[in-house]
Image (tube, rainbow, N blue to C red):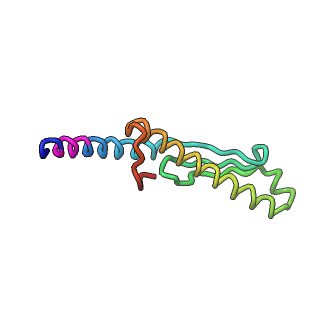
Amino acid sequence: MVKGLGEIMKQAQKLQSKIAQIQEEMAHKTVESSVGGGMVKAVANGKQELLSIKIDPEIIKSEDVEMLEDLIVAAVNDVIKKSQEMVSQEITKISGGLKIPGLI
């Protein structure tokens, strides 16, 4: 029984190492969200860090501040969700679908 536990620990360490590698790789991958017909675009990396926001100058000219604020919030929320999904998919590939709490 102890031998089996040792093997499980080795497997867990391998998995942990692979997950750490994927998390590092995800820091260099990006996802983009575009809302309002492309009026606001947001880019984030796999660490759920917002990298950039692009705002079409036409929406600024409209002086509709409330709509612009809503579009920014929508773009940021969507790009963070996409980033989380990207990381989750990569981790699922190596974990065989095993749900591991606290990874994302």
Q: Position of residue 88 (x, y in %)?
A: 48, 44
Magenta span: chief secondary structure: helix
**Residue at 46% across / 43% down in the picture?**
28
| Of residues 88 and 46, the one drawn nearer to the viewer in this rendering | 88
Q: Is residue 65 left or right of residue 104?
A: right
**Residue at 16% across / 44% down in the picture?**
6
The image shows a total of numbered marks equal to 0
Which image quarter is the N terminus in? top left
80 within the magenta span: no
Span of residues in magenta = 5-11
Q: Position of residue 68 (x, y in %)?
A: 77, 58
Name the outermost residue toward the left: 2
8 within the magenta span: yes
In which image quadrant can residue 77 be found?
bottom right
Q: Is residue 10 left or right of residue 31?
A: left
Name the outermost residue toward the right: 62
Q: Position of residue 57 (x, y in %)?
A: 79, 51
Q: Position of residue 34 (x, y in %)?
A: 70, 45
**Residue at 45% across / 46% down in the picture?**
27
Name the outermost residue toward the front: 1
**Residue at 38% across / 40% down in the picture?**
95
